[in-house]
Image (cartoon, rainbow, N blue to C red):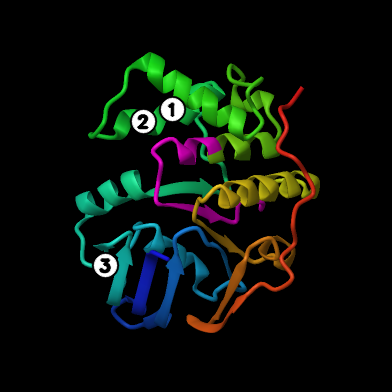
């Protein structure tokens, strides 16, 4: 199986004039194409810093990070931006939708920022509609975010993350701002996407959410303290249906 993420001896140290803080300390693990991995840790454990490095939002102080065969750890900002646009589909806790745009307009926005393989407006709309249907929002393509629930907004964000066919989907606390029943819907979508071959990496502090993943990595004080296959994976019983 192909290795999609390779972290080797990753450390991240933040320095001021008087203080040096180690956020990550010698992190090493691989993630294979098609895995569904949850990275867990309490507040201050380093999981957000790790997410920023995996997402090419930051670079490590030392160590090597390879994403889909490309070394990322030494890239400049414009090169990191290209990696983020081409290789990573982000899903954030805060949704990050443009409030005055429709769901369809939000979903297709990343298409127009890519330099390769440009598409026409009509083709972009077809692509966006297809992904909205995939997450159960085919009947909401003309709604704005203030007409949606938190769970629906997160589904829009998932659809948006898919449009550039990224190597990985990177979800940062994706259920943090939604009700528990809607969280189950979101996890059903992630499991469906993973079963279809998508690589999903999820940052969370909630054990019940992490239990939906196939593998769980625990970090504490900037170190990996466990990395195990989830033998009791919680399978969602919900279908991804169209909203009425």
- Measured along the vertical axis of the image, is residue 157 above or below residue 177? above
Q: Secondary structure at mark 2?
A: helix
- Measured along the vertical axis of the image, is residue 51 above or below residue 24? above
Q: Secondary structure at mark 3?
A: loop
Q: Residues within 10 Å of mark 3 (few under 14, many from 20)?
A: many
Q: Residue furthest front?
A: 1
Residue 95 location (% of width, % of height): 56, 41
- Measured along the vertical axis of the image, is residue 144 above or below residue 175? above
Q: Nearer the viewer, residue 12 or 239?
A: 239
Q: Which residue is mark 1?
A: 108
Give the left or right position of residue 144, taking residue 112 as reference: right
Please give the label number shown on residue 73. 3
Q: Nearer the viewer, residue 4 or 93?
A: 4
Q: Residues within 10 Å of mark 2 (few under 14, many from 20)?
A: many
Q: Secondary structure at mark 1?
A: helix
Q: Which residues are magenta?
A: 159-176
Pointer 2 with pointer 1, Cβ within 8 A: yes
Q: CA distance from mark 2 to mark 1?
A: 6 Å
Residue 42 location (% of width, % of height): 62, 73
Give the left or right position of residue 189, taking residue 54 as reference: right
Q: Nearer the viewer, residue 108 or 144?
A: 108
In magenta stretch: residue 174: yes
Residue 14 location (% of width, % of height): 35, 75
In magenta stretch: residue 90: no
Residue at point 54%, 76% (across, down)? 45
Q: Which residue is mark 2?
A: 111
Residue at point 77%, 22% (across, down)? 244
Q: CA distance from mark 3 to mark 2?
A: 26 Å
Q: Quadrant of residue 123?
A: top left
């Amino acid at each position: 199986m192909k290795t999609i993420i390779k972290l080797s001896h990753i450390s991240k140290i933040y320095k001021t004039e008087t203080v040096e803080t180690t956020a990550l300390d010698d992190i090493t693990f691989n993630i294979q194409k098609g895995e569904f991995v949850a990275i867990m840790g309490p507040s201050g454990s380093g999981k957000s810093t790790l997410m920023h490095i995996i997402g090419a939002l930051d670079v490590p102080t030392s160590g090597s990070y390879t994403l889909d065969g490309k070394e990322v750890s030494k890239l400049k900002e414009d090169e990191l931006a290209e990696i983020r646009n081409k290789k990573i589909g982000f899903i954030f806790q805060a949704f990050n939708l443009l409030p005055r745009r429709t769901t369809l307009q939000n979903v297709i926005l990343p298409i127009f920022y890519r330099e390769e393989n440009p598409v026409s407006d009509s083709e972009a709309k077809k692509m966006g509609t297809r992904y909205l249907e995939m997450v159960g929002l085919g009947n909401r393509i003309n709604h704005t975010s203030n007409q949606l629930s938190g769970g629906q907004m997160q589904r829009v964000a998932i659809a948006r993350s898919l449009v550039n066919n990224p190597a990985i989907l990177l979800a940062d606390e994706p259920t943090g701002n939604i009700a528990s029943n809607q969280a189950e819907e979101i996890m059903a979508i992630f499991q469906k996407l993973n079963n279809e071959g998508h690589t999903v990496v999820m940052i969370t502090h909630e054990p019940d959410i992490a239990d939906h993943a196939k593998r769980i990595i625990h970090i504490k004080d900037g170190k990996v303290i466990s990395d195990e296959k989830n033998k009791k994976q919680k399978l969602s019983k919900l279908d991804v249906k169209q909203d009425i």
